[in-house]
Amino acid sequence: MLHIFVDADACPVKPEVYRVASRYRLTVTLVANSWMRVPKERWIALEVVEDGLDAADDWIVEHVQPHDIVVTADIPLASRCLKGGALVLGPTGKLFTQDNIGEAVAIRDLLTELRGAGELTGGPPPLTKRDRSRFLQQLDELIQSIRRKQPFNSA
């Protein structure tokens, strides 16, 4: 059964994930380093992992199955999930694929190096309404595409 995993600590599109998952009757697991409030629905689970570098990422990679969807802005996590056969979507609606993940990793590494050298400050720009709309559309299209390829099993 198709499952959505959310790298939840800093994810700005959790409400959008809930909305789409509810429409398709999918289960959602939010993975975080600390407790957070989530809707009280049977199909939404919160997995709080121990503190530690990459603990949430490691948990997601260990539990994700081929054709599951992972929502994350974390490029190294996206790369690891793609290797496991998952589909990965960023909060801005960017779909990470085997074809574009190498470039995304290289850009991330370059930006990290520039920040370390003091050449670049600040983080990513705030999420816009257009980003949220693109995310919703991409998530919907991903789910439909997966369902067309797999036999449908209702929950």
Image (cartoon, helix red, strand yellow):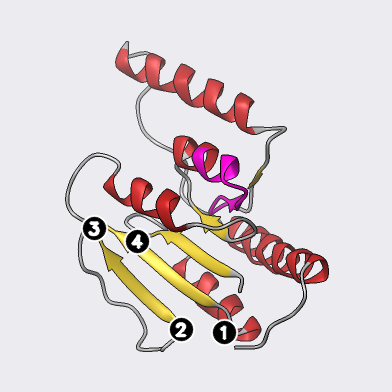
Number of residues whose C-alpha sits closer than 10 Å to that of mark 1, classed few (under 14), some (14–19) or many (20 or more): some
Q: CA distance from mark 2 to mark 1?
A: 8 Å
Of the two numbered discs 3 and 2 on the same chain, state the one appearing first in sequence.
2
Residue 22: assigned label: 1
Please name whichever residue, 155 or 20, is drawn nearer the observer in this view of the structure.
155
Q: Is residue 104 left or right of residue 97?
A: left
Instruction: Tell me which label, 3 or 4, sits earlier in the chain.
Output: 4
Three-letter code for the amino acid on which mark 4 is drawn: Val
Magenta span includes 82: yes
Check disc 2: other Cα within 10 Å, few if <14, some if 14-19, many if 20+: some
> Who's the residue at 54% across and 37% down the image?
79
Q: Which residue is mark 3?
A: 49
Q: Are marks 2 and 4 in contact (CB under 8 Å)?
A: no
Element type at mark 3: loop
Amino acid at pointer 2: Trp
- 119 w.r.t. 65: above or below: above
State the residue position of label 2: 43
Q: Position of residue 77 (x, y in %)?
A: 45, 41
| Type of the residue with mark 1 | Ser
Q: Which residues are magenta?
A: 80-92
How far apart are the two marked residues, 2 and 4, measured between alpha carbons? 14 Å
Q: Quadrant of residue 104?
A: top right
Crowdedness near tag 4: few (<14), some (14–19) or many (≥20) residues, C-alpha within 10 Å = many
* Residue 22 appearing in the image: yes
Mark carried by residue 31: 4
For the residues labelled 3 and 4, say whether their Cβ atoms are less than 8 Å apart. yes
Amino acid on which the number 3 mark rests in the picture? Val
